[in-house]
Image: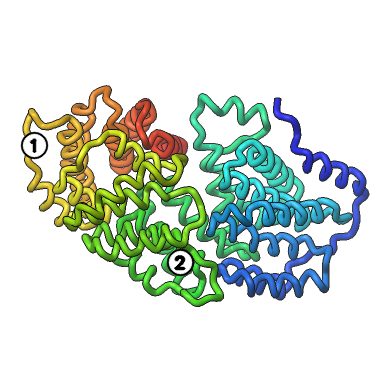
């Protein structure tokens, strides 16, 4: 068994030495609220100014310490700069120790303890410190769970607890025994109920809870795409200067194939020097321009991303997308250069990077019209996608990957056009063609069939296909498909 984190032992001693109850002094003041709002806009310097003002007047205010932690946490998440990781993690852990040492025993103190520990854990996880991250995340979960029992009416606690319950509830059954042993239990239904409570009841964290609720709603129920998008549209309209909320909206619009609106939100984003540099937005925009066939703009955005990004993730993916942009615009020397960069730069942890690396390993030149059809379909341009697909010449002698993808793309296009009967036909054809190969079209097709049958209220058939999606092994989207299928099964 892993030894407890040394910092936790120190924190435990601090808690035990201050076990006598004391009057609560922590509260969420107007100055703390200003700091909170500025941090969420990603205006970190401005947030620090108000947080410092609040802490100067009430240095033992757990709410102020919690909100102050947002600055370091969001900086690490957005910029992923390893050169400042140690300094910012140390600052976060120092705040955690201060909160733990507070004499008061209150909802604010205990919530801040859980929330800052969760932020510390997520920061560590982002930078690959998995063992220590797992310890912090477990301790945070246990604190949220204890808070829910001790302070059932304290709404902010329901926000992150709800997310954790949804995520734990979506873990495949074969791993749940381990989570149960370490005291982490979850349910998609209970988690969503907690998120709804945090999102639709007045509390200082309501707006961020709404954003998280919308993202989680879309993830757990594909039939609620429009509802989830509407929530984020309203928030962006109300707070057009909030860059973090705008990022969430662009992400959801991209995922739900509203490319033009996503690009509109991107081009209208606040860009002055008060905001954190947010390189990943460039990478997202590059995808959106690629979907539209604006290859020069796509290349420009990914080149800017590679220049600004200080992290290790998405490097292979960006080079792969640059290869596609130049390949499709017939600039072969540039395409070849970025093709080589896929192997030479970045790491393979996230699925986008794994897919890019596997593309090079296979040494297969993409079929141009099939690729164009895929990109137009991903962007929601279904008529253009169908037209490109009509240019693909497939026969029984064509490679299996080409024939299977042709069927899968046709299914996705008809699915997007709400022609469910045609979509079902072509999804099943893709599954049959893939057989026992490691092509990802079969598990993707099974997942989509599950969603269709769920919409048609054929729940038993939906369960069959969600389970089928999870049964496929050794494909590059294994983690995300299994997670989506499990979430869908949990929600049925």
Image position, residue 423 (x, y; %): 20, 41
Q: Is residue 311 left or right of residue 448?
A: right
Tell me the tag on residue 246: 2
Point 34% across, 42% down: residue: 356
Point 19% across, 56% down: residue: 331
* The one of 81 and 183 positioned closer to us in this rendering: 81
Q: Quadrant of residue 328?
A: bottom left
* The one of 198 and 128 positioned closer to us in this rendering: 128
- Determine the secondary structure under disc 1: loop
Does 247 sit above or below residue 145?
below
Give the quadrant of the N terminus.
top right
Image position, residue 271 (x, y; %): 46, 74
Point 36% across, 39% down: residue: 357
Image position, residue 314 (x, y; %): 42, 50
Tell me the tag on residue 394: 1
Q: Are marks 1 and 2 in contact (CB under 8 Å)?
A: no
* The one of 363 and 447 positioned closer to us in this rendering: 363
Image position, residue 192 (x, y; %): 53, 48
Mark 1 closeness class: few <14, some 14–19, many ≥20 residues within 10 Å: few
Please report whichever mark, 1 or 2, sits nearer to the chain's N-terminal start.
2
Q: Is residue 254 left or right of residue 57?
A: left
């Amino acid at each position: 068994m892993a030894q407890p984190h040394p910092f936790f032992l120190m924190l435990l001693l601090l808690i035990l030495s201050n076990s006598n109850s004391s009057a609560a002094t922590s509260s969420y003041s107007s100055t703390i609220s200003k700091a909170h709002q500025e941090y969420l806009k990603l205006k970190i310097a401005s947030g620090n100014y108000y947080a410092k003002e609040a802490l100067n007047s009430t240095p033992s205010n757990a709410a102020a310490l919690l909100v102050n932690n947002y600055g370091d946490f969001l900086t690490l998440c957005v910029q992923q700069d390893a050169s400042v990781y140690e300094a910012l993690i140390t600052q976060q852990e120092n705040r955690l120790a201060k909160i733990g040492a507070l004499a008061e025993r209150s909802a604010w103190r205990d919530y801040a303890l859980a929330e800052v520990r969760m932020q510390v854990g997520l920061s560590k996880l982002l930078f690959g410190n998995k063992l220590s991250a797992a310890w912090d995340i477990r301790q945070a979960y246990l604190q949220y769970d204890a808070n829910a029992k001790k302070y059932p009416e304290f709404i902010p606690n329901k926000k992150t607890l709800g997310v954790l319950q949804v995520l734990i509830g979506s873990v495949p059954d074969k791993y749940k025994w381990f989570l149960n042993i370490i005291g982490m239990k979850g349910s998609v239904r209970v988690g969503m109920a907690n998120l709804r409570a945090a999102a639709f009841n007045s509390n200082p964290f309501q707006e961020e809870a709404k954003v998280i609720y919308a993202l989680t709603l879309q993830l757990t129920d594909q039939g609620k795409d429009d509802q989830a998008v509407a929530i984020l549209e309203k928030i962006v309209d109300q707070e057009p200067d909030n860059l973090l909320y705008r990022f969430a909206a662009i992400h959801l619009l991209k995922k739900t194939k509203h490319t033009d609106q996503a690009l509109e939100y991107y081009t209208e984003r606040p860009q002055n020097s008060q905001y954190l540099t947010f390189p990943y937005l460039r990478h997202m925009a590059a995808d959106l321009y690629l979907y539209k066939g604006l290859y020069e703009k796509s290349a420009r955005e990914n080149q800017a991303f590679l220049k600004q990004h200080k992290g290790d993730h998405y490097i292979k993916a960006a080079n792969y997308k640059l290869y596609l942009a130049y390949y499709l615009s017939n600039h072969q020397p540039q395409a070849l250069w970025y093709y080589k960069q896929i192997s030479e730069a970045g790491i393979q942890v996230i699925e986008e990077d794994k897919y890019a690396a596997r593309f090079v390993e296979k040494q297969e030149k993409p079929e141009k019209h099939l690729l164009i059809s895929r990109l137009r379909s991903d962007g929601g341009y279904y008529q253009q996608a169908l037209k490109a697909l009509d240019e693909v010449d497939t026969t029984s002698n064509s490679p299996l990957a080409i024939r299977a993808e042709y069927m899968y793309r046709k299914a996705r296009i008809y699915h997007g056009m709400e022609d469910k009967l045609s979509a079902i036909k072509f999804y099943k054809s893709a599954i049959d063609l893939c057989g026992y190969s490691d092509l990802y079209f079969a598990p993707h097709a099974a997942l989509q069939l599950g969603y269709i049958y769920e919409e048609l209220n054929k729940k038993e058939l939906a369960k069959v296909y969600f389970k089928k999606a999870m049964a496929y092994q050794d494909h590059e989207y294994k983690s995300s498909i299994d997670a989506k299928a499990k979430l869908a099964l949990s929600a049925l």
